[in-house]
Image (tube, rainbow, N blue to C red):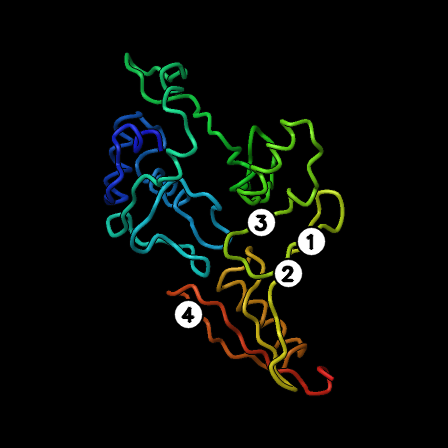
């Protein structure tokens, strides 16, 4: 993202081009192919992706139901306006930089005005420890910080996990434990309609779950009305009439 800011890449360019340029400018040891994945990760603007993406995408950059993006030569990216809103450009005058083979290559870190690790979440290995930080609402994080800085006690509800575009419910069930429920409604005596599922589900895992329920005869059958290309999640589930009475 620093290279995109430094080169002012605000007009869409191929992901492949930006990855190659970044690898060259920063002597990136992981290679340009790895950077393509980094770019796609920072583009994710779908449910379960980033609440505050730093990179804007154009073309097939992945979606909620199918996170696999197109080849980097077919998708484009540009610096998101969010990035400039989150930084103070004067900071770059004093930030420490990495020095490699006689030249400065990139900043060691970028101080954002909001804690992105709380807003976008983080899952994986960090500093040798496994972590699973769920994303939070941008507005709620702002309120929490403002209250804290004014010596007021923020409500715990401000730190409930939040996913942009998610239509289901998120509830606290214990300390640092949450229940995330999708949306299901009854449409007649024998049918249910699922219009949302927890963000951890994609198309394949949803189908696997419903197939498993059908195999165990917990449900009678289901109709797949999803449109992965348009990121539309919709299932009609058929039950025995007695089970819905």
Say above or below: 242 vs 53: below
**Image location (x, y in percent) of residue 70:** 31, 54
Looking at the picture, how far across and down is residue 144, in whole percent? 62, 36
Closer to the observer: label 3 or label 2? Answer: 3
Q: Helix or strand or loop: what does disc 2 sit on?
A: strand
Depth order, front residue of 34/116: 116
According to the picture, the residue beneath numbered tag 1 turns out to be 171
**Image point 60% across, 67% down: which residue?**
183
Which residue position is annotated with label 3? Answer: 162
Q: Nearer the viewer, mark 4 or mark 1?
A: 1
Q: CA distance from mark 3 to mark 2?
A: 12 Å
Location of residue 96 with respect to 146 vertically, above or below: above
Total numbered circles: 4
How busy is the neighbourhood of tag 2: few (under 14 within 10 Å), some, or many (20 plus)? some
Across and down, in percent, residue 198 comes to 58, 59
Q: CA distance from mark 3 to mark 4?
A: 24 Å
CB contact under 8 Å: marks 1 and 2: yes
Q: What residue is shown with label 2?
A: 181
Write down the residue under mark 4.
227
First of labels 3, 4 by sequence position = 3
- Measure the C-alpha gap from mark 4 to mark 1: 28 Å
Q: CA distance from mark 4 to mark 2?
A: 21 Å
Depth check: give the residue in front, 104 or 165. Answer: 165
Mark 1 or mark 2, earlier in chain:
1
Distance between the alpha carbons at the discs numbered 3 and 1: 10 Å
- Which residue is at a point 68% across and 36% down the rendered structure image? 154
């Amino acid at each position: 993202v620093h290279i995109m800011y430094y080169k002012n890449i605000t007009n869409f360019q191929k992901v492949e081009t930006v990855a190659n340029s970044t690898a060259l400018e920063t002597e990136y040891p992981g290679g340009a192919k790895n950077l393509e994945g980094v770019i796609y990760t920072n583009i994710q603007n779908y449910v379960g992706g980033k609440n505050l993406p730093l990179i804007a995408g154009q073309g097939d950059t992945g979606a909620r139901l199918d996170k696999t993006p197109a080849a980097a030569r077919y998708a484009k990216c540009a610096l998101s306006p969010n990035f400039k809103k989150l930084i103070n450009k004067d900071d770059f005058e004093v930030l420490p930089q990495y020095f490699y083979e006689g030249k400065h290559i990139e900043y060691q870190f970028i101080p954002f005005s909001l804690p992105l690790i709380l807003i976008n979440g983080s899952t994986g290995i960090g500093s040798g420890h496994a972590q699973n930080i769920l994303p939070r609402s941008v507005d709620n994080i702002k309120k929490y910080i403002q209250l804290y800085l004014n010596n007021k006690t923020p409500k715990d509800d401000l730190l409930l996990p939040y996913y942009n575009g998610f239509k289901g419910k998120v509830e606290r069930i214990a300390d640092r434990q949450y229940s995330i429920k999708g949306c299901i409604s009854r449409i007649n005596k024998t049918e249910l309609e699922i219009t949302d599922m927890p963000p951890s589900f994609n198309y394949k895992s949803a189908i696997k779950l419903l197939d498993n329920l059908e195999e165990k005869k917990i449900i009678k059958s289901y109709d797949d009305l999803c449109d992965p290309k348009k990121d539309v999640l919709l299932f009609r589930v058929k039950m025995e009439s007695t089970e819905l009475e």
